């Protein structure tokens, strides 16, 4: 059992694992050392939020690192005391004299390492600005127009505040909405309808949910619900009709990975995905706490808001008519 746990917890030369109790922690530390020692590998630098086990099970001089409040874990920072995760911006530097170019915006944007998507509403902004540079056909090292440069500098000045943004590392067993992962994409420059973009968003959400369920397979039998504020998309998903090729292909993907009954409507003002689709400042993100979701998610399913679908007939029928021409 420990060998399987250890295998699933290895990321290159790092081991990141969770256990349920002090006893399980002691067992995992001792047995994983023995297993790795068979191949002449030494597991050291142990860090965890059980200080008692740290003292009892780790040799302070050889196998343990000094107890730190914020510990680097796979590119993120883990706060032991609060058991939270946050983005590592310790090495972020700002220069007053730097020239804002397309290359600089791209470089700065990708310095934010965020594999679980805590900051997607924030990182959307420089991606949109990069699109603007492509529209004006700027070269990589051209000094950008003042309007674009000003927007980027305003975004850049707030990045140090990301250290205030924290989410819980663990998921509790009772109803308590928590962020696990998020994804966002910038709309393509090619003209495409809002409803089609929203349908693409549904596909992205489905793929992300499948990944999460696979990673959390140990929990077993997790009920999954999908929410969208697009009545047009929900109408396409829930009705067995022949749509235009673009819509039909996305609906097929969605229906092959989920049931139509799993898809529900959420009003736009209550939709947590609204921020990642529009972008916002760090302070707005912290204040909105979008990763916790609407408050009614903690209620019984029977108390969730129910809405009849009233899609835009012109949009829906246009997709149907295209397939019949």
Image (cartoon, rainbow, N blue to C red):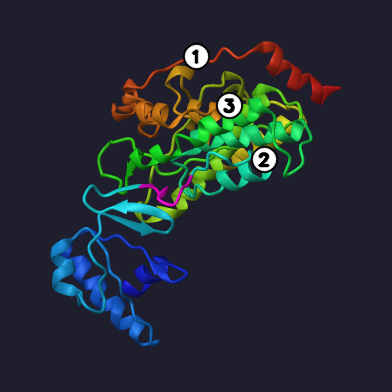
Q: Quadrant of the N terminus?
A: bottom left
Q: Earlier in the sequence, mark 1 or mark 2?
A: 2
Residue visible at 33% across and 42% down in the picture: 167
Residue at numbered disc 2: 101
Q: Position of residue 155 (x, y in %)?
A: 52, 33
Q: Residue at x 32, y 25 (%)?
A: 295
Q: Nearer the viewer, residue 200 or 100?
A: 100
Q: Main secondary structure of the magenta part?
A: loop
Going from N to C along the chain, the mark reached first, 2 or 3, is 2
Total marks shown come to 3
Packing grade of label 1 (10 A; few <14, some 14-19, many >=20) is few
Q: CA distance from mark 1 to mark 2?
A: 48 Å
Q: Position of residue 283 (x, y in %)?
A: 39, 29
Query: Up-down: is 89 above or below 59?
Result: above
On the question of residue 258 being in view, the answer is: no
Cβ–Cβ under 8 Å for marks 1 and 2: no
Check disc 1 and report the residue beneath it: 308
Which region of the structure is painted magenta? 86-93
Quick check: 104 left or right of 223?
right
Magenta stretch contains residue 38: no
Q: Quadrant of residue 67?
A: bottom left
Give the image location of residue 249, x and y in percent.
70, 37
For the residue labelled by badge 1, is the local secondary structure a helix, a strand or a loop? loop
For disc 3, the marked residue is 238
Structural distance between the alpha carbons of marks 2 and 3: 46 Å
Image quadrant for the C terminus?
A: top right
């Amino acid at each position: 059992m420990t060998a399987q746990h250890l295998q699933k917890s290895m990321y290159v030369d790092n081991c990141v694992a969770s256990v349920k109790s002090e006893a399980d922690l002691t067992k995992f530390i001792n047995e994983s050392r023995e297993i790795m020692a068979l191949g002449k590998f030494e597991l050291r630098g142990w860090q965890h939020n059980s200080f008692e086990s740290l003292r009892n099970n780790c040799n302070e001089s050889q196998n343990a690192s000094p107890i730190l409040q914020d510990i680097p874990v796979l590119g993120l920072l883990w706060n032991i005391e609060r058991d939270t995760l946050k983005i590592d911006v310790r090495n972020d530097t700002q220069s007053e004299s730097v020239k804002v170019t397309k290359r600089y915006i791209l470089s700065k944007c990708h310095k934010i390492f965020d594999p679980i998507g805590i900051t997607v509403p924030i990182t959307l902004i420089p991606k949109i600005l990069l699109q603007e540079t492509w529209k004006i056909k700027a070269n990589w090292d051209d000094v950008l127009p003042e309007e674009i440069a000003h927007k980027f500098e305003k975004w850049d000045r707030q990045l140090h505040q990301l250290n205030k943004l924290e989410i819980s590392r663990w998921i509790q067993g009772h109803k308590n909405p928590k962020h696990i992962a998020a994804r966002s994409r910038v709309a393509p420059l090619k003209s495409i309808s809002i409803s089609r973009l929203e349908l693409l968003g549904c596909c992205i959400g489905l793929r992300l949910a499948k990944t999460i369920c696979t990673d959390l397979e140990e929990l077993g039998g997790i009920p999954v619900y999908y929410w969208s504020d697009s009545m047009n998309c929900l109408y396409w998903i829930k009705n067995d009709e022949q749509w235009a090729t673009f819509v039909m292909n996305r609906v097929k993907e969605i229906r092959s990975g989920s049931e139509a009954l799993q898809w529900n409507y959420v009003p736009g003002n209550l939709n947590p995905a609204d921020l990642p689709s529009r972008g916002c400042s760090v302070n707005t993100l912290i204040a909105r706490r979008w990763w916790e979701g609407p408050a009614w998610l903690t209620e019984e399913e029977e108390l969730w808001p129910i809405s009849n679908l009233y899609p835009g007939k012109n949009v829906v029928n246009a997709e149907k008519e295209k397939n019949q021409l």
